[in-house]
Amino acid sequence: MNEKIADFLFPNIDKTPDYYEKMYPKRNLSDDAMVTRFGPSPTGFVHMGSLFGSFCDYIFAKQSGGVFYLRIEDTDQKRSIENGIDGIFNDLDAFEIVPDESARVGGDYGPYIQSERTEIYQTYVKDLIRRGLAYPCFLTEEEIKEIKEEQEILKTKLGIYGHYATDRDLSFDEIKEKIDNGEEYVIRLKSPGNPDKTIKIIDCIKGKIKFPEHNIDTILLKKDGTPTYHLAHAIDDHLMHTTHVIRGDEWVSSIPLHVQLFEVLGFERPEYAHTAPITKKDNGNIRKLSKRKDPEAKVSYYEEVGIPIDAVKLYLATILNSNFEEWYLNNQDKSIDDFTFTFDKMSVGGTLFDLDKLNNISKTYFSRKKAEDIYEETVGYCEKFDKSYAEVLKDNKDLMIAFLNIEKDGPRPRKDIAKYSDVKNEFSYAVDFMFEEENYSKLDSSKDYDIDMLERYIDIYNINDSKDEWFNRVKEFSINEGYSPNVKEYKNNPDKYKGHVGDVCEAIRVMTTGRDKSPDLYEILRILGKDKLRYRLELFRKYLNK
Ligand code: GLU
């Protein structure tokens, strides 16, 4: 009779699971190669949490010599948005997380869009019905609501199981009559589970997980014949030969169902790695990074504010493996590809997404980049997001590269830039007209400075001095002006001096840059040269009203 029901419900399905088993043979890969997949639903922009997931998929497949593929999970057509698929491809492209197989590049295990795989799902479901492991269920929404209300009052497990599963054993005639009457139905799993028994799995990240066996007749095919996530997961990950399902831990509670589905379908189960949610500190509380509240949850945010994608990836690597950051700081010339990631160094609880930390990582990243590259990339960024500054950069190429190059060499390069947009603020004093506009507005002290001393300093300034010669000259100058040549001496005899050499340098710095902190003063003075120093002295004189 089951055979008859199966044929009646799926008259157009003429294939058997065997057909697909042959069509998608085992992949020809080494034993430890991982096959991973990213399965986003095209319901809006890619959330940073999902991007993190795809980054894990990508890394683990790549480093094991395996395959990373992209599968569009659009079975919930109501939630899918127009251009959602393009958005996913664009976000992955931006992060250079390139799938080996996808709807775009193809592959031997497609289609890679679930809505194009309906026939495959129905073939397996037809077979389950034939084997008495699935059935059509005609319960209406109203009836299901009543069941739920009753279960809530009784405080028993929710769902269709046991005596609530009234349609489990309908005869062919009963089924035919209902369908002929136009009654709608879903296909449910005839769950063989016994909740008194326990299932155990070892999750690659969370370790041992135990659950009672699944015994709910979960929906496999919806009224419109499309699969639920659960069915699609089992069939696709089986046929596409996924070895490691890396997904958010909101799916942990579905493990018993998934284990059972793999069993009834006769599939070998992949390994599971359930990732902790990406969280954020908000007023002292830790909560999930939210699409609605947090701009940084949107993948496009990073491009807009000008954090290089490679820096964001480095940050993702630091939250992916707890030992990555230290490794990166100690390995100047290495890249993410040189690090071996493991599941056991992944967070089990929550993964804190910390923008300050990201900025620090990005600063380190910039500090290792050549000034010329920072310049070119900043021009590229500004052409998109700050056109007028792009022109300024282009008109002052050599000058800007010289500034960006200050303190780049040596074991502790400067870390002042975290994003392309920082270049404008950090070096606004570099270009004369911007310096004029900004003038001394960035100074936070209302200190007075000896403008005549500064004038005398410019007179003795020699652009050809080496750094040592320059500093010796500043010291000599300080003594002549009544300042101590070192701080200690000044502290021992404060009454004897107007101040110390540091105060002299501060005055020069403030006059030149409009700030009391700046990169190496010697370099700045050399880049600007004497004429510009004189010009700035006049601006400073006006500012000080002298
Ligand atoms: N489409 C599912 C989601 O967006 C994918 C989960 C999975 O990776 O299995 O949550």
Image (cartoon, rainbow, N blue to C red):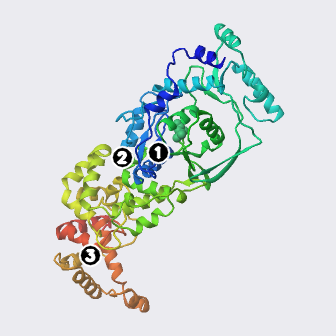
Q: Quadrant of residue 130?
A: top right
Whichever of labels 2 and 1 marks the residue nearer the N terminus, that label is 1
Residue 282 seen anywhere in this rendered image of the structure: no
- On residue 251, the disc is none
**Residue 254 % position (x, y):** 64, 40
Residue 454 bears which disc, if any?
3
At label 1, counting other C-alpha atoms closer than 10 Å, the crowd grade (few under 14, some 14-19, many 20 or more) is many
Pinpoint residue 32: horizontal percent, then vertical percent. Answer: 46, 52
Label 2 – label 1 distance at C-alpha: 16 Å
441 displayed left or right of 46: left
Position of residue 316 relative to residue 94, above or below, is below
> For the residue labelled by badge 3, is the local secondary structure a helix, a strand or a loop?
helix
In terms of image quadrants, where is residue 419? bottom left
Q: Which residue is mark 2?
A: 96
Residue type (three-letter) at the residue carrying disc 2: Glu
Disc 1 designates what residue? 36
380 left or right of 75 in image? left
Q: Mark 3 and mark 1 in contact (Cβ < 8 Å)? A: no
Could you tell me if residue 121 is visible in this image?
A: yes
Q: Looking at the image, which is closer to me, 141 or 16?
A: 16
